[in-house]
Image (spheres, grey):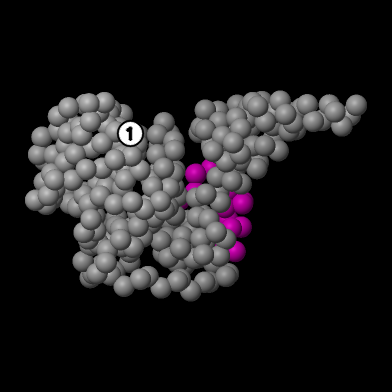
Amino acid sequence: MRTAPDRPGLLRLEAFFGGEAYAPHRHDTYSVGYTLRGVQNFSYRGSALSSAQGHVMVLHPDEVHDGHAGVDTGFLYRMIYIEPALIRAALGDTAAPLPFVRDAVFSDPRVVSLLQSIFADMETPLDPLQRDHLVCGLADALAGNDRSLPARARPKLDVRAIEATRNYLNDNLGRAVRSQELEDVTQHDRYSLARQFRAALGTSPYRYLVMRRLDHARAAIAAGASLADAAAASGFSDQAHMTRQFAQGFGLTPGRWRQLHTSAQGDADG
């Protein structure tokens, strides 16, 4: 079992179990996760359920559940535990009931993709913008799978706010940017702004910032900077953090990219 060094209100966990995994218990959080390998059996709300590879699981706050392996080879799963108050804030309607997902186990490639991004780097604490990006995504996923809720309307776009956000991120890629800063710049709350930004540019403010950091790091490496110096100058916590993000963004490690770039330059000079 391993957990990530997360911020208050969130906990990311990856665990493998064989046989009896855990006795009946309950959390005061939403538990949202997916099975990577094997079969996970559990009792929940009076039903016996099974989650196999690729299935999404959503357990609601204060609901008793247990867990055990459904196959002899055990099961591997990942789960994020998120405080209900964060979900309520992200949905923006404090008077509405919390989302209720009737099916505790279901298939949804979009939710799996979101969860995979959440667990892509468990070695590094969540960036402030990343945390809010994940909360917004999870809130939308929960609301989207609550059949009692109407479909969310497409956000109205404040083009000036989106451009101000983009410029602010470009100007501050070398440090951690907090959502409060973007709220001050745009006069929009962080979750509304994140939805507008994605609708306009196809990505979240956090992911946009990461890609600008990677562009900066790539240019620094091409100019001859060491990998450690490129990481420090581009807003990454260390070289290992940059390497993980580089591989996710470009499919190559920084070292391999430098080799290819140097080889291409040599061929051009020759």
Q: Residue at x 52, y 33 (%)?
A: 244
Indicate the quadrant where residue 235 lies.
Answer: top right
The x and y percentages for residue 243 are 55, 31
Task: Check the image and name the residue furthest to the right.
Answer: 270
Q: Residue 163: say if magenta.
A: yes
Indicate the quadrant where residue 54 lies.
Answer: top left
Q: Residue at x 29, y 33 (%)?
A: 38
Asked if residue 219 is positioned above or below residue 135 in the image, the reply reads: above
Q: Residue 220: say if magenta.
A: no
Quadrant where the C terminus lies? top right
Which of these two is toward me, 261 or 239? 261
How many dots with numbers? Answer: 1
Which of these two is toward me, 144 or 169? 144
Q: Which residues are magenta?
A: 162-178
Which of these two is toward me, 217 or 79? 79
Report whether 96 appears left or right of 222. Answer: left
Report whether 229 appears left or right of 130. Answer: right
Asked if residue 255 is positioned above or below residue 192 in the image, the reply reads: above
The x and y percentages for residue 104 are 22, 52
For label 1, the SS is strand
Dot 1: within a 10 Å radius of its alpha carbon, few (fewer than 14), some, or many (20 or more) residues? Answer: some
Report whether 59 appears left or right of 129. Answer: left
What residue is pinned by disc 1?
37
Report whether 14 appears left or right of 192. Answer: left
- The amino acid on which the numbered mark 1 sits, given as a three-letter code, is Arg
Instruction: Tell me, yes or no, if residue 245 can be seen here.
Output: yes
